[in-house]
Image (cartoon, coloured by chain):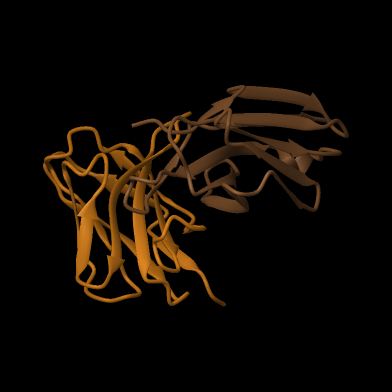
Amino acid sequence: DGGITQSPKYLFRKEGQNVTLSCEQNLNHDAMYWYRQDPGQGLRLIYYSQIVNDFQKGDIAEGYSVSREKKESFPLTVTSAQKNPTAFYLCASSITGQGETQYFGPGTRLLVL
Amino acid sequence: SQQGEEDPQALSIQEGENATMNCSYKTSINNLQWYRQNSGRGLVHLILIRSNEREKHSGRLRVTLDTSKKSSSLLITASRAADTASYFCATDAENRDDKIIFGKGTRLHILP
C-alpha cells in the first residue's frame, strides 16, 4: 500500500516541552510539506523540502524545526518557542514540488496540557 | 499571504441538488487545484486545471477557470450525503517558488 502516514493521531504537549510529529511516505516523492490548520481556517505552510538534506521556511516557521535526512521522512518538531501550538498538523508530499498535486497524510492533532 | 479565497464560506443544500463553490485569486497562476477535506481528516485532491484550460470534468465534478477574472468554480452535480465536507482551492503563483497556497475553504453540508 502506497501512501503517507502521520503519527501519532493525537499528541499532548506540556508547558516548555518540545514534541516531534512524524511523517513518512513510500510514494518516492521528492517534495514534502508541513501545514498547520486552525479551526475553520485554511492551511498555512510551516516548512517544505524539495530534496533530501534541504528545506525552506514557509509562512509560519517560527517556533518549529524540521529535518530531511531521508527521502521518506520529514519530522516536524514543535518547540517551546511556539506559544500557541494547539492546531491540526498536516503533512503532504508531491512528486517534484513544482506546484503540482499534493498527497496528504491523515493529520496529527496537537493539544496543550 | 492569501492567494485563493472561496465563496461562500458555508453552503447547505438538499441531497440531489447541485452545489457550486467559487474561488478568486490575486496573481497570475500556472494551475489551480481543488481539494476536499472530511472533518478531522487530511485533504484529498479532486482536480487540477491548468491556466490554459477553461473547463475540466471528473465524474460529478466540473471545474471552470476564468483567468481574465482570476476566478474558478467547482460544481458538484446530484449531491450526496457523502459530499458533506470542506472544499479548498489551491493556487500556485508564478513567483512563489513552486509552493501552492490554500484558501480558507467552503464548508458544504448536504441535507437528507
Of B30 and B110, which appears nearest the observer? B30
Q: Residue at x 82, y 38 (%)?
A: B79
Q: Position of residue B88 (x, y in %)?
A: 55, 39
Above or below residue B25? Residue A21 is below
Q: Colour of chain A?
A: orange
Q: Residue at x 19, y 71 (%)?
A: A53
B63 horizontally vs A28: left or right:
right
A52 horizontally vs A33: left or right:
left
Q: Position of residue B34 (x, y in %)?
A: 59, 45
Of A23 and A95, which appears nearest the observer? A95
- What is the quadrant of the C terminus of chain A in the image? top left
How many marks are shown on the rendered structure?
A: 0
Q: Position of residue A14 (x, y in %)?
A: 19, 42
Of B97 and B87, which appears nearest the observer? B97
Using the rendered view, name the quadrant where residue A74 is placed.
bottom left
Using the rendered view, name the quadrant where residue B73 is placed.
top right
- What is the quadrant of the N terminus of chain A in the image? bottom right
Q: Residue at x 62, y 23 (%)?
A: B10
Q: Which chain comes out brown in the rendered image? A: B
A77 horizontally vs A93: left or right:
left
